Amino acid sequence: ELGLINGRLVDMNENVVTMEDRGHQFGDGVYEVTKVYNGKCFALRPHLERLYQSLRAIRIPATYTFEELVQFHEALIKESGIKEGAIYLQITRGAAPRVHPFPEQVVPCLTMSIRPSGPVKQELRDNGVNIILIPDERWLRCDIKSLNLLSNVLGKQQAKEAGCYEAVMVRGDYVTEGTSSNFFVVKDGVIWTHPATNLILKGITRTIVLERLAKELDLTILEKAFDVSFVKGASEAFLTGTSTEIMPVVSIDGKMVNAGIVGPITRKLQDAYTQLINDECGR
Ligand code: PLP
């Protein structure tokens, strides 16, 4: 497995990050994950645009240009020879003796890695997954793709221990998103998802569904918050995410959605998303 630190290719097992990096000590950084299909990074531009937004939000200076970041992604793909995989990128505020405020003259630290990853399991794509609902205990800037993922980690572990694929979070009366995915439901032919406020991450896959696929397929989609009882009465539900792609949900807290059958709107979106990947990445 291949890594890259501040633009230099390294073996992932090499010790390259300093102990006092603020990513370790404070979670003081941001990240992105992109998928590689057929040796090409899918939707890299919007991912990098979101990265710059996250950096701005936590006031880490952008020390690499867009073109450089594109080159680093291409170098990792080329040098690793990986055709189907995922690239992880993080930028921390950098290393300095541990104090809470931003140290003066601290230099941001960029690390990246590439790993092979197979296609989403066909069985899950075809038959859907089970999810649980859990309280959303995160901070109020979920729109920033920050390294502080403790709630997400605990939630995903809870899902795993319940034999579920994902935990979807509920803040007050409203359903927000999954621990590493956005959440959608279909009711009376209309697709609903939480608006892109500070309470969710504005997923790239979510945006593709909203701005491209739903339009292409002439589907009605609403960015409007909904509650748990609304979810329980939904005719379809699905998750979206870079790694998750479009994943049908067939049971919520042990209760079947649409008698456990994947619905037609979810199916159409799944097919259109695969088609888009194939078109963009020349598969
Ligand atoms: N919501 C959260 C909390 C996430 O961590 C992620 C991605 O991992 C998503 C949503 C989906 O975002 P994207 O489609 O950009 O991968």
Image (spheres, rainbow, N blue to C red):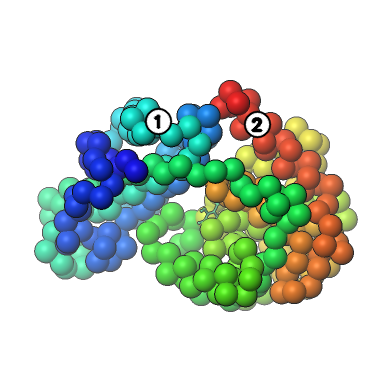
Badge 1 crowding class, 10 Å Cα cut-off, few under 14, some 14 to 19, many 20 or more, is few
Residue shown at 72% from the left, 36% from the top: 272
| Residue, disc 2 | 276
Left or right relative to 186: residue 23: left
Amino acid found under the numbered disc labelled 2: Leu
Query: On the image, which quarter does residue 51 sit in?
Result: top left
Left or right relative to 80: residue 50: right
Q: Which element is circle 1 on? A: loop
Q: Mark 2 against mark 1, which lies toward the viewer?
A: 1
Give the numbered dot on residue 18: none
Residue shown at 61% from the left, 47% from the top: 120
Does any portion of residue 133 appear in the rendered image? Answer: yes
Q: Position of residue 109 (x, y in %)?
A: 23, 48
Q: Is residue 102 above or below residue 3?
A: below
Residue shown at 13% from the left, 55% from the top: 104
Return the disc, 2 or 1, that comes first in the chain's sequence: 1
How many numbered marks appear? 2
Give the numbered dot on residue 81: 1
